[in-house]
Image (cartoon, grey):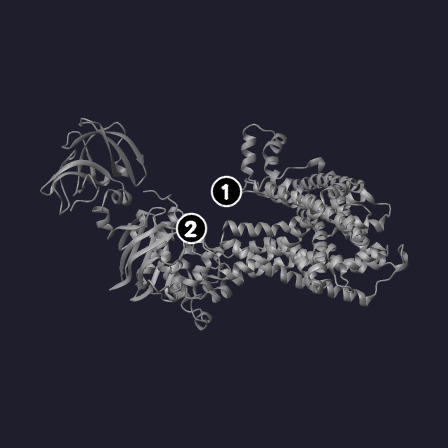
């Protein structure tokens, strides 16, 4: 069942188009991540859904009701949404509990309706209820903001880069807590982010927004493995791009003959290999000869820069290896590729097939 | 995978560039327009004087004497205030001076003592203390906190890491103060000095009591002796231009103060220098300062309270009914003036915080211009205007309140803006998203957040009105006496004992409000 339906949405600021013809459908109970770089229009899209801004064209329907359209602009308070702002926007003059019940009718506010339950839902102890928001860490503030947004049982939860102000460790923990709370309530949610890992790990579907247009909407695995074009491929992860020639489901390139994802074309193409697909072997093993020219060690894994030595023109590719397997610079190795690869048309950069 | 790409600010800026509702804009316009009224009128009147006549009037020896007096005193007081203010700030903030917290408070309190009250104290202590020396002493005592406060704040805000870095690069402690600390204090110091200059330029009551002739006392004298048209207009214009020059310089100095520490996080406090043998002289200095700025004024008021009227040069007693009347007038004028001024500042502040645009900035600057318009110029302009164009308003309470609103609009605007910035738009949006209409958001989000700040703004304006003398003296309806005008009237006639109860009440109100405000600002603020 489609819960949020956006059609042909346009928005201009002072004549500059920010969103152009955006179409998006979000199913009930789904979490869609809108992924875009800075200035791509993703925050604007969210603010249009919230009703903080007016659309110039197109329609937005929440749960079958048109909230924005050619003649309609429902104010935010009538849209039955839950909104979590970038830095939480907790009311500084109210306690955690009063923040959570803020959107409820007076009777339920008095009764502190569901405060403990909601705190538990977002993974906070009930003892937090009486604290002022200032006494909370950034991650805790975000969890309270989510609890506040969920309290009136909204039809749609909208999250505007809710983790970007948190430091790395807190971010992962808070993400998990928020994802769990959203899943537990079965809420339909839209999350805006510029962080690929966040979009891929949290979204049931990821919508990539670029220059005001949605270029691809797909589940995270498809998005990562079969990106729509070279730009998306690079945006959602590291990419090694090589020239090759495709024929009958296989492509021939520097790494030899590799199997293409289904529906591949024929002729000259650009081949996408993800760094983690590249395997290193000893020189005795079969594969493409290469020398390790640099290692960036991250602990759990390592990014290894490799010079292909068997080529006419020297070419460098990047591989990602588990931290314990990271080689010494200068080591001679052979490279193989594991798994299917994707090919793009070399002219348009679009995925073939 | 880059995590560092910041997004948002660009789109948020675009989003905030909206047009304010027309009704709000109209309300916001009122303040700037009434500020512009006396200013434009004064300059217009001066410009109407025939060229040759103007030259003749301005070349009078009287104008020369006034210029020498005014500028000489401005320079002397500014330098003295800068020296005392900086030294006090440094001792309080950066040394192990015993009781530095208490001294820090005592160093700021003299701002609550209006110069005409301290001049009353000094004159009644020693009638010989008059003219330049007396004026210098009184205004320095009253206004050095204008340097002390910003310099102390700047010293507190300095990142000790900068000084430590300089020390690690081989600077001695003196060289470090000169080459690292002083340049960072410069905006605060210069800004404070220009505020002192501005306040000395517009001071009237103290100089009149000390018989020191400046532009303000001369303007008052000319008004009392029949208001000589073109001569007074030109004097007012010269004074106004001097003030505006100070104001513009101050804005420039403050605007260029790009030394704010960026980044969040808790900053360590700088280590305090051990005073050692210089502790005693430093303590003696602070004691003398407190004695001069607070001890003498409060002590003399207390002394005269206990004396019979006959002990003063002019024997006169204060009457209880007059005291009650004056107190009620002061309170009533203070409260209604504060309400009107904050009401004018509120829409302007809201538009300025929420709908930034060039036009709105212009409106705000127009309102701040009032800082450079001396109270006496405002009062004289309003008198002339009402006599010519709106006679029924002449010598009425609404006109006096309008004058207060003009003079204190900048003060209210600063506080209102600070209050409004407590309520970011994100909070309103959060409220709207939770199902509240704008009225409910205003009631449940905005008001609780900005209410205390608005109260503080009103309290500041209230204290300022209660201790205001110039505009009150010129514009109060006949028969209306306030605490300030009573102190003035009795001191002018050397009835020191009669003036004491009024002065005591006024000082009590002023100190009480200052104390309440200071407590509020010391209390934890909302940080979100």
Label 1 sits on a secondary structure element that is loop
Q: Evaluate if marks 2 and 1 touch, with contact meaning CB atoms under 8 Å apart.
A: no
- In the displayed structure, B426 sits above or below B5; it is below
| Chain ID at mark 1 | B
Residue B262 marker: 1
* Tags 2 and 1 both on a single chain: yes
Measured as percent of width and height from the top left, residue B23 is found at: 52, 62
From this view, report whether residue A64 is shown above or below residue A174: below
Q: Which mark is residue B14?
A: 2
Q: Which of B241 and B341 is in front in this view?
A: B241
Q: Residues within 10 Å of mark 1 (few under 14, many from 20)?
A: few
Q: Can residue B143 be seen in this view?
A: no
How far from the left and from the top, in percent, is residue A328? 27, 30
Q: Mark 2 lies on which chain?
A: B
Q: Compared to B259, does B479 lie above or below?
A: below
Answer with the quarter of the image where residue B188 lies.
top right
Q: Quadrant of the N terminus of chain A?
A: bottom left
Callout 2 crowding tier (Cα within 10 Å): few <14, some 14–19, many ≥20: few
Horizontally, residue A187 falls left or right of residue B468, namely: left
Position of A262 with respect to B25 (left or right) is: left
Q: What element carries label 2?
A: helix
Image-based side of B112 in relation to B418, left or right: right
Depth check, front residue: A54 or B388: B388
Q: Earlier in the sequence, mark 2 or mark 1?
A: 2
Q: Which residue is rendered at x = 63% and y = 56% of the image? A: B34
Which residue extends farthest left? A248
């Amino acid at each position: 069942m489609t819960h949020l339906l956006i059609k042909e949405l346009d928005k201009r600021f002072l004549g500059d188009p920010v969103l152009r013809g955006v179409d998006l459908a979000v199913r009930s109970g789904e979490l869609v991540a809108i992924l875009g770089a800075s200035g791509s229009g993703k925050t604007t899209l969210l603010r249009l859904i919230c009703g903080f801004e007016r659309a110039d064209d197109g329609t937005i329907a929440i749960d079958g009701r048109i909230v924005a359209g050619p003649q309609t602009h429902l104010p935010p308070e009538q849209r039955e949404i839950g909104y979590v702002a970038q830095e939480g926007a907790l009311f500084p003059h109210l306690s955690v509990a009063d923040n959570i019940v803020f959107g409820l009718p007076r009777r339920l506010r008095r009764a502190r309706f569901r405060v403990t339950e909601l705190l538990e839902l977002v993974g906070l102890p009930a003892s937090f209820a009486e604290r002022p928001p200032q006494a909370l860490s950034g991650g805790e503030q975000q969890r309270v903001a989510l609890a506040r947004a969920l309290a009136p049982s909204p039809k749609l939860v909208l999250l505007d880069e809710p983790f970007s102000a948190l430091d790395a460790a807190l971010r992962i923990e808070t993400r998990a807590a928020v994802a769990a709370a959203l899943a537990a309530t079965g809420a339909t949610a839209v999350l805006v982010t510029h962080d690929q890992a966040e979009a891929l790990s949290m979204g049931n579907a990821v919508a990539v927004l670029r220059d005001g247009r949605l270029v691809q909407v797909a589940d995270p695995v498809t998005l990562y493995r079969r990106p729509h074009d070279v730009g998306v491929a690079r945006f959602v992860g590291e990419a090694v791009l090589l020239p090759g020639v495709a024929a009958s489901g296989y492509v021939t390139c520097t790494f030899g003959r590799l199997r293409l994802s289904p529906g591949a074309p024929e002729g000259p193409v650009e081949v996408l290999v993800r760094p983690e697909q590249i395997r290193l072997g000893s020189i005795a093993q079969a594969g493409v000869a290469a020398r390790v020219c640099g290692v960036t060690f991250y602990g759990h894994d390592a990014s290894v820069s490799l010079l292909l030595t068997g080529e006419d023109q020297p070419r460098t590719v990047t591989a990602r290896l588990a931290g314990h397997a990271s080689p010494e610079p200068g080591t001679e190795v052979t490279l193989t590729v594991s798994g299917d690869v994707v090919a793009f048309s070399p002219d348009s950069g679009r995925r073939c097939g | 995978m880059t995590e560092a790409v910041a997004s948002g600010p660009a789109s948020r800026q675009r989003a905030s560039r909206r047009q304010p509702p027309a009704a709000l804009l109209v309300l916001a316009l009122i303040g700037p327009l009434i500020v512009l009224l006396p200013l434009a009128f004064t300059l217009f009147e001066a410009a109407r004087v025939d060229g040759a006549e103007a030259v003749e009037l301005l070349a009078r020896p009287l104008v020369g004497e006034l210029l020498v007096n005014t500028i000489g005193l401005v320079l002397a007081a500014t330098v003295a205030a800068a020296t005392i203010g900086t030294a006090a700030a440094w001792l309080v903030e950066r040394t192990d001076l015993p009781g530095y917290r208490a001294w820090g408070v005592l160093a700021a309190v003299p701002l609550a003592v209006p110069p005409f009250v301290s001049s009353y104290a000094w004159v009644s202590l020693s009638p010989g203390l008059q003219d330049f020396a007396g004026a210098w002493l009184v205004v320095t005592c009253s206004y050095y906190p204008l340097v002390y406060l910003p310099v102390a704040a700047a010293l507190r805000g300095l990142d000790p890491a900068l000084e430590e870095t300089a020390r690690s690069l081989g600077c001695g402690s003196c060289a470090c103060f000169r080459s690292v600390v002083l340049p960072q204090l410069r905006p605060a110091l210069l800004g404070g000095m220009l505020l002192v200059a501005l306040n000395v330029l517009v001071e009237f009551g103290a100089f009149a009591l000390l018989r020191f002739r400046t532009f303000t006392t001369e303007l008052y004298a000319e008004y009392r002796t029949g208001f000589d048209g073109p001569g007074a207009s030109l004097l007012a214009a010269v004074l106004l231009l001097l003030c505006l020059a100070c104001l513009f310089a101050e804005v420039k100095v403050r605007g260029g103060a790009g030394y704010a520490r960026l980044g969040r996080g808790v900053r360590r406090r700088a280590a305090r220098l051990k005073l050692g043998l210089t502790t005693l002289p430093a303590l003696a200095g602070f004691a003398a300062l407190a004695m001069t700025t607070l001890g003498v004024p409060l002590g003399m008021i207390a002394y005269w309270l206990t004396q019979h009227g006959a002990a003063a040069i002019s024997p006169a007693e204060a009457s209880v009914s007059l005291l009650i009347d004056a107190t009620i007038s002061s309170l009533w004028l203070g409260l209604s003036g504060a309400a009107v001024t904050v009401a004018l500042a509120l829409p302007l502040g809201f538009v300025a915080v929420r709908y930034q645009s060039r036009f709105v900035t212009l409106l705000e600057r127009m309102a701040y211009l009032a800082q450079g318009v001396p109270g006496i110029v405002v009062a004289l302009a309003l008198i002339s205007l009402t006599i010519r164009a709106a006679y029924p308003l002449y010598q009425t309470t609404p006109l006096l309140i309008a004058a207060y609103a003009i003079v204190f609009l900048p003060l209210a605007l600063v506080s209102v803006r600070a209050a409004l910035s407590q309520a970011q738009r994100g909070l309103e949006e959060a409220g709207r998203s939770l199902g509240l209409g704008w009225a409910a958001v205003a009631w449940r989000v905005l008001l609780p957040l900005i209410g205390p700040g608005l109260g503080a703004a009103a309290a500041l304006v209230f204290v300022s009105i209660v201790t205001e003398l110039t505009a009150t003296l010129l514009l109060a309806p006949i028969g209306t006496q306030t605490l300030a005008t009573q102190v003035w009237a009795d001191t002018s006639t050397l009835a020191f004992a009669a003036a004491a109860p009024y002065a005591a009440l006024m000082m009590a109100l002023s100190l009480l409000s200052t104390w309440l405000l200071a407590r509020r600002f010391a209390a934890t603020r909302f940080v979100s």
